[in-house]
Amino acid sequence: MKTDIRNRDDIVILVNAFYQKVKNDSTIGYLFTEVALVNWEKHLPIMYDFWDNILFHTGNFEGNPMVKHRMLDQKSTLNEIHFRHWTKLWKKTVDDLFEGEKANEVKVRAENISKLMMNKVVV
């Protein structure tokens, strides 16, 4: 039986599962593994903080995701398909692992963030 996202430990499970899918994804994986050359040991804790702050208002995230995505777009053009696919993968990962109010909230927040990024980055 699935539970709701209750704490940072659940965020860690979600983020790890999501990026495991991303790394092997034929649509967006290359952006992380070949273009951005993501250092996962550094990136994952930042993502834990980001989503922990989004869901539980911890205030433990510092950074500017918009700048990072604009820099990535300069290296390899991002498009609407990338953002829509990212959102689809995120929602599927949430649905595979969790259900409840916070699970629904994190899907809505991710979709809104993705749309905002797409509108600011994709020209």
Image (cartoon, rainbow, N blue to C red):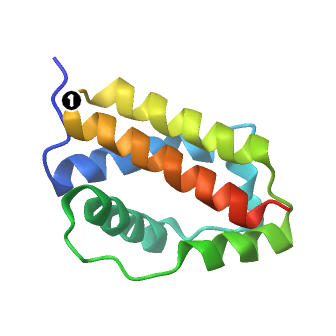
Q: Residue at x 47, y 28 (%)?
A: 92
Q: Quadrant of the N terminus?
A: top left
When the figure is inspected, residue 72 is found, relative to residue 52, above or below; the finding is below
Label 1 element class? loop
Residue bearing the label numbered 1? 100
Q: Nearer the viewer, residue 90 or 122?
A: 122
What residue is drawn where x is 55% and y is 35%? 89
116 relative position to 11: left or right: right
* Residue 78 visible in rendering: yes
Q: Residues within 10 Å of mark 1 (few under 14, many from 20)?
A: few
**Image-quadrant location for residue 86:** top right
User: Identity of the amino acid at label 1?
Assistant: Gly
> The C terminus is located in which quarter?
bottom right
Could you say which is closer to the camera, residue 112 or residue 49?
Answer: 112
Nearer the observer, 57 or 3: 57
Q: Residue furthest top?
A: 1
**Could you tell me if residue 24 is visible in this image?**
no
On the picture, is 66 further left or further right than 20? right
Q: Foreground residue, 115 or 59? A: 115
Q: How many marks?
A: 1
Q: Determine which quarter of the picture holds residue 107.
A: top left
Can you give x and y, in whole percent of width and height, for residue 35 in the image? 77, 65
Residue in the picture at 23% in, 41% down: 102
Instruction: Return the x and y of residue 67 as percentages of the image width and height.
Output: 64, 79
Q: Position of residue 118 (x, y in %)?
A: 69, 56
The residue under the point 31% across, 68% down is 49
